Amino acid sequence: MSFSAGAGQTIEEGARVEIFVRPEYIRTVRAAEAGKLAADGDNRMDGVIDSLLFNGANSRLLVRAGSGELVEADVTLTGENDLKSGDEVCLVWSPRQAMCFARQEIA
């Protein structure tokens, strides 16, 4: 996978990294509709909704990425986006909202 992060971060291309994005900055759409939401330069990650945690109008999705990672994203349920467990989705965020750190391997 390849992602972009904010300026000023010095990480070698191809290095293993940890990327952090606040859940409220991640936009979620069905995989089939991803082209409508992503702007040029936005980061994208495909996955499957593992679970949906309801908290009123603002709820949290747990999305299982293709790499097996579990990613949290906030979503406002409007009635138009009837997302549910098992749905294929695309997570989209701006590089300006991402913090990237060199991955620390733990022995």
Image (cartoon, rainbow, N blue to C red):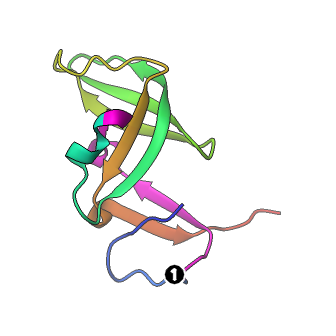
The 10 Å Cα crowd at callout 1, few under 14, some 14 to 19, many 20 or more, is: few
Q: Which residues are magenta?
A: 13-32
106 in the magenta segment? no
Residue 29 is at least partly visible in this image:
yes
Residue 80, image quadrant: top left
26 in the magenta segment? yes
Secondary structure at numbered mark 1: loop
Residue 43, image quadrant: bottom left
Whether 25 is drawn above or below 32: the answer is: below
Q: Which residue is mark 1?
A: 11
Can you give x and y, in whole percent of width and height, for residue 23 in the image?
35, 43
The image quadrant where one finds the C terminus is bottom right
Residue 34, image quadrant: top left
Can you give x and y, in whole percent of width and height, for residue 73 in the image?
37, 38
Count of labels shown? 1
Residue 30 is at least partly visible in this image:
no
- Identify which amino acid the numbered label 1 is placed on: Ile
Task: Please state if 84 lies on the left or on the right of 106 as rendered.
Answer: left
Can you give x and y, in whole percent of width and height, for residue 87 in the image?
43, 23
The residue at 32%/79% (across/down) is: 7
The residue at 28%/66% (across/down) is: 41
The image quadrant where one finds the N terminus is bottom right
The residue at 24%/16% (across/down) is: 56
